[in-house]
Image: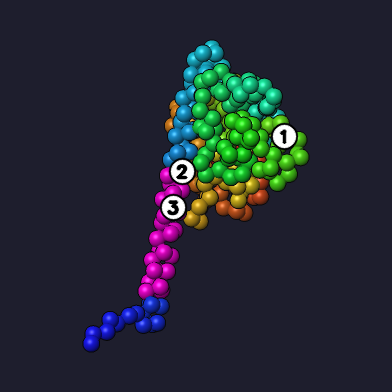
Amino acid sequence: MNHKKGFTLIELLVVIAVIALLLAILLPSLRMAKEYATRLSCANNLKSIGQALHLYAQANKDLLPEARYTDTSSDGTPSYFIFSVNTALPRDMRITDKSNLAPLWTTGVIDTSEIFYCPSAYREFCYAAYRGPHDWPSVDLSFFANPTAPNNQTSVRISYSYLPQSIEKKVTIGSRTFPSIAKKLSQTHSKYAIALDILQLRERMSHLRGGYAGANLLYSDVSVRFRNNPEVMKPEAYGSDPMLTAASWRTIIQGLE
């Protein structure tokens, strides 16, 4: 009589150990591949924003959308906190803000709202946070840890900062000198970023994976480059939230450029 031999306990444990080892080797690579894909998608979004800014300037005598962040701003927050919303209005009229990247939407230069969001962005910087009970832009207050905060009720944030930097003029913030804010496209230069991933709380950064931190930067020639200068992105240099201090935020951007 023939008896089929089954797995012994030791053989089963060896198989499980081999599978666990393979997963340990493969999963980080899969996560990195996913992050690389979302980073490319993020870069494509920024490139679309860059093309839209050029179209907007062409239609408005070289003028760029007005930046809410100014030479005298005390922090970088206004650069991404951009849309004032009235959800009582029809969808195409809900955005009432006229600064930062809002005009690209309200004038129809950009008509796909997902472009304003990096696919790796977190919580209040992600597209899902502002679709709400209706279509974008609407706010589902249950999404937020503190839904009663006034800003959560009236504004829509995106995951990109708008910082049109001028080649023509400098401004001193603290003890450092930075490019001033450009009013016109012709005042910008391809060596200075005009938009980038938000650089808020480190744990909320869009591209924080695999032991590195970095950001996609959009330049005025519509090129997008991923930067991860360790001298400014390491935790001790980055700090907890550089956007609370204009000098810290601009120093990091300058280091990435």
Q: Label 3, on which residue? A: 32
Check the image and name the residue furthest to the left. Answer: 1
Q: Main secondary structure of the magenta part?
A: helix
Query: Relative to residue 211, is residue 70 drawn left or right?
Result: right
Q: Which residue is mark 2?
A: 38
Q: Does residue 7 appear to the left or right of 62 in the view shown?
A: left
Q: Position of residue 110 (x, y in %)?
A: 51, 24
Crowding at dot 3, Cα within 10 Å, few <14 / some 14-19 / many 20+, comes out as: few
Residue 251 screen position, x and y as percent = 60, 41
154 in relation to 5, above or below: above
Q: Is residue 238 visible?
A: no
Above or below, 210 relative to 125: below
**Which mark's residue is nearer the viewer, 1 or 2?**
1
Viewer-nearest residue: 172 or 137: 137
User: Which sits earlier in the primary sequence, circle 2 or circle 3?
Assistant: 3
Which label was assigned to residue 45? none
